[in-house]
Image: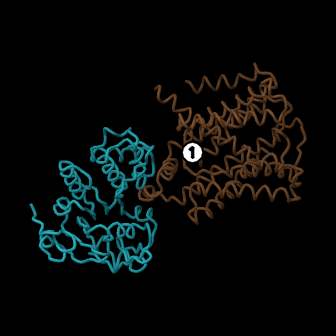
Amino acid sequence: MAALLDVRSVSKRFGGLQALSRVAFTVDAGEIVGLIGPNGAGKTTLFNVVTGVYPPDDGRVVFRGEDVTGAAPHRLCKLGAARTFQVSKPFATLTVLQTVRIGALNRIPDMAGATVKALEVLELMGLAGKRDEPGRTLTVMERKRLEMARALATQPSLLLLDEVAAGLRPNEIQDMIALVRSIAAGGVSVLIIEHVLEAVMRLSARIVVLNHGEVIAEGRPAELANDARVIDAYLGEAYSLA
Amino acid sequence: MVAVAALAIAAALPLAAGPHLLTAMIVALHAAFMALAWNVAAGYAGQFSLGHSLFYGIGAYASTVLYLRLGLTPWAGMFVGAALAGIVGGLLALGVYRYKVHGIFFALVTLGAAEVAKGLADNWAFIKGPVGILLTMQNAPGDFFFLRREPYYYVALAMLVAMIVISLRLERSPLGQYFLAVREDEQAAEASGVDSYRYKTIAISLSAALTAFAGSFYAQFYLYVSPDTVLIFEPQLTMMLGTMVGGAGTAFGPVIGSLLFSGLGEALRNLPFLESTRGIVIGSKMVYAVLLIVVLIYLPGGLITLGRKGA
């Protein structure tokens, strides 16, 4: 069976900076894949290329068997790839329910149906009590949850999470891990960028390590924790899986 | 209930008003309609056009020229004008957004488009250039001409009620949600499956078409259309003042703001120290400006937020 997401030798250059060079990996249906690497390794750039924020200079992005290289972000969302933003972008003056309903309209283009779906997602994300609050009044944790709720409401087959655990307190990280697991258990594949190693190591079935825009390693968390290249480039010391 | 009561009062008002007050009320209803039409693009979709006089002008000229040249009743002509303005607005938006023109630059480009239109109209003999076109006062309800003011009042009222209904329906429709999403954050809108290019274009086109109806009404009421009356910044200013002060992105804010400014304009006209017409114009603009600044500083969401805080 073909991979859900197939990134084929993607390169992207910004002026003199080679942000991505010949990056290739796949995400299969039902899989949680982690994407790690030091700051500036090209992780968010890769998200942006995959979700159509800008086209790659070279290479192809194939999603669900369709070549989506350079397709607009809303096209990707319609096809089933939804993302969150590293710096969360709440619709500041809209309420939590309005925001998530906009996501839900992606698949259910009528207000009543979309409202039902939005409330269901808000319940799952633990935001039901905040439904009438405007986005700008939410805390960091709530904003991240709102980002995820908005993305999830679009009913994706692939969810791309950009640092949803960063900035959270330890107990909140545990909650976030449980949340991502329950989303994946619902049949959604997840590609997750994360600096909080505990989260990404525990969640991912497979991890792709980026450094200077190149994939330097790929494998199961346990393998990578002892990989000399990964330790050198990113981990700094051998990471012990708790 | 409140809506029914308000409508009943509005419908009964001409019985109590003299001709002067009636004219002022027609102008106020017309201003509220225009404000709501602009609000579709600027308030809901966040596309701050400064070129809406162009669409107002298209409406005014289209119904007038179609009536005089082809004998088409302005009742139908105003719909043709709206369609034309919708197309012009849509094409303008397609071009402008294609080059990713945002915010202040979008405002400037649209302002420029309206200026270009005025220049063209001034030099276009077919529509009599700067001289303008006069319509004859007559009693012909089938052609949207009345000798008395009351019918104009009821037409203006009906148009405003229809515009409020359109605004409320928009607020409760998927289309309205896409407009809001684009206004709040285009990237997040795109990530939610909203085609921002498409919906910004639809917002401008729809808003332009609605604005054109106001232009046609203007022509039928004042019986005179010229570049210096409909293609200047004045109609745009009327739309913006009412919307910004009343509350952009709501169905009733622009109405409240427009009625307030219209009432204020009437009140200032009667001040003893403003003897000349020029004095009235300058004096009232100063008052408008101060009011606008005060409201935007202390009530950035417009006067309508006062009601919400109380509730």
Q: Quadrant of residue B247?
A: top right
Q: Quadrant of residue B188?
A: bottom left
Q: In the rendering, at what x and y percent does residue A52 appear?
A: 42, 68
Amino acid type shown at disc 1: Gly
Q: In the rendering, at what x and y percent does residue B297 appear?
A: 55, 37
Question: Which one of the lettered chains is coloured cyan?
Answer: A
Residue at (67% x, 46% y) in the render: B210
Single out the residue that lies furthest toward the top.
B16
Asked if residue B252 shows in the view, the reply is no
Chain B, colour shown: brown
Asked if residue A48 shows in the view, the reply is yes
Residue at (19% x, 74% y) in the render: A230
> Which of the two residues, B174 or A94, is positioned nearer the viewer here?
A94
Residue at (82% x, 52% y) in the render: B66
> What chain is tagged by disc 1?
B
The quadrant in which the N terminus of chain B is found is: top right
Q: Quadrant of residue B139?
A: top right
Q: Secondary structure at mark 1?
A: helix
Specify how the rendered protein is coloured. by chain
Task: Identify whether B24 is placed above or below A38.
Answer: above
The residue tagged 1 is B43
Single out the residue that lies furthest toward the front.
B273
Residue at (62% x, 59% y) in the render: B93
Q: In the rendering, at what x and y percent does residue B91 appear?
A: 65, 61
